Image (cartoon, coloured by chain):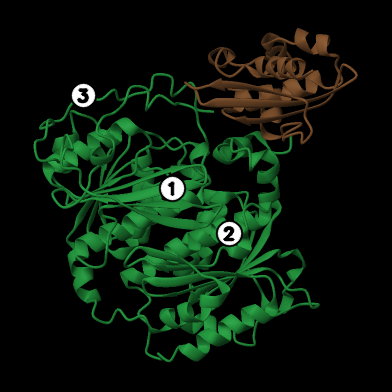
Chain colours: A green, B brown
Amino acid sequence: MILSKEQINRYLRHIIIPEISGQGQKKLLEFSVLVYGETVEEISPMIYYLSATGIGNIICHLHNVQGFESLISNIKDYNPDISLKLNDENELNNDEVKFRIFFGNINYITNFKKNVSVKNNIFIPSIISVYNEWDSIIAYFDNEISLNHFINNLSNEYTNLNNINKYNCGYIISYSILGTLCAIECFKKCLQIGQIQNDNLYLDLFSMEFNKIEQNNLESFIKKLCTVNYENINNNHIKEVMSQSKVLIIGAGGLGSPAAYNLALAGVGTIGLIDNDKVELSNLNRQIIHSVSRIGMPKVESAKIFLKNINPDLNVITYMDYFNLENAVEIIKDYDIVISAVDNIQTRYLLNDACILANKPLVEAGVLKFNGTNTTIIPNEGHCYRCLFPNLGAGSGASCSETGVLGPVPGIMGFIQSAEVIKIIAKIGITLKNKILMFDAIDFDFMNVNLEKNPNCPVCGKNPSITTLQTYDLTCKTKEDNKI
Amino acid sequence: MYNDIVLDHFSDPRNVGEIADANGIGYVNNAADGDKITIYIKVENNILTDVKFKTFGCGAAIAASSMVTVLAKGKTLSEALEIKNEDVSFALGGLPENKLKCSNTAADALHSAISDYKLRE
């Protein structure tokens, strides 16, 4: 067999995707990437999702190595297939490196001016990911001239020499989402899926706007990134309201992992986690808050260990249970905001109705294969799930087969959910209210679809027919049997 | 839950892809389970000189598709029509009981490709 039984189990959700299969997974495990970053905190989400994807060799070149040893031991426990090490400049051996990622704030990236090494005149394909609070650019380069041109441009436009507060929410959101996008790019580069040379993007996560960068507008986007200004955002105030907030996350899996991770980093006061499953090896291609040593442990407990490790002050409340008709109202009432990180449509309907009736914002996401969606439901203000799909149609939740999902895709969606939560709590920015964000990892495309509240909606319309929670056909009987 | 032969064919499937100049294409859709199997055949002088597949579905469906291409390649049309779903699961060393009905349909897709070929003739 080309993969061990353990590997087949771990990467099951990848292998089942025809574009990846076992052969693709093997290639990923043999791939090597060199990551340039400033601090361990900033590169950690990327390292987790590179490891989740099964990129076998990760070499890091860090400005500040503090905390790297503990990241190594965490990754070893998360995925022992991965070799993670520091690059020693003196013995830089680029021969094995097939891809480079330059990752950091503008100050850090401009340090690479005239400093990007090219060995034996062979340019290693590279991604630059650069962020300025809530805004960022991710761009691919296949030659030295355009890469240097980009960095020079950045350095010419950037005049802010003030100290950057790297630990405000905007930065945390940016480096998490961007790092995860880098993991996707690494995957695509390795398997030659999609057209990576067209993947240049400008992300404005404050307003949830995403723009493709073309050759002719590159300079204007660089200018925008360098001059964007969030000075009027009171980060101390955000910190304060975050620390008093209680967020409920339904599901401690592929979406719940990144959402909880980011909220813990951003300093939310209380996270409630509900999930009835135990950690399995096949979760670990995407569920970064769990690990090999915690296989068999209830997911909520495993998640709590991870989250407390990031933020010891965080209050984590765990519910090892299914979210259902009996407990929905009772659990939701204690929280300010709910994150839907579930894997079935029945629970989505239940959650939608429960949040509308309890008047709690609901931050929703879903993923399949290489695609993901996000939307934010603010009762009384915007659309809800039933505005779009009034009823749970017969058979619509019947598919039990696993279509598979690329690990970093729920990562992006879950991190976006945490960004939505922060914006709602802090009352800043523009959320995905009355919008659906659709992400396609292969085309590297984020698309916003505008929606409106439906006046005839059965739960949030003018004359609602649903005024209490109903019974939903909750379980798919053969789910356990069809897991593989 | 799967034996080594199944895991091998699932993780390293043989004959994946399309045949550009296929002269028969067969499908099986299992809407309830989401399995979709497409088999492409190239027939020359009554012999299946090439067989390829594209399958979206669970591990058993992928392994069965892979195995059916291995079994059918080089066979005559009438020999290929003799390959039944049970032969595929037998060649795989057995499939779990709950997978036999829903995912072991690759031979049906092969037969559908052969019918398509005959219709085109």
Tell me the quarter of the picture where residue A322 sits.
top left
Seen at 62% across and 39% down, the residue is: A7
- Say which label, 1 or 3, has the lower sequence index: 1
Q: Determine which of the numbered discs, if any, sits on residue A372 in the image.
A: 1
The residue carrying pointer 2 sits among few (fewer than 14), some (14 to 19) or many (20 or more) residues within 10 Å by Cα, namely many
Could you tell me residue A442's position as x and y percent?
Answer: 56, 52
Can the viewer see residue B21?
A: yes
Q: Are marks 2 and 1 in contact (CB under 8 Å)?
A: no
Please identify the quadrant where the C terminus of chain B is shown.
top right
Q: Which residue is mark 2?
A: A185
Could you tell me residue A293's position as x and y percent?
Answer: 49, 43
Tell me the quarter of the picture where residue B6 sits.
top right
Tell me the quarter of the picture where residue A323 sits.
top left
Q: Are marks 2 and 3 in contact (CB under 8 Å)?
A: no
Q: Secondary structure at mark 1?
A: strand
Left or right: A285 with respect to A462? Answer: right
Q: Secondary structure at mark 3?
A: loop
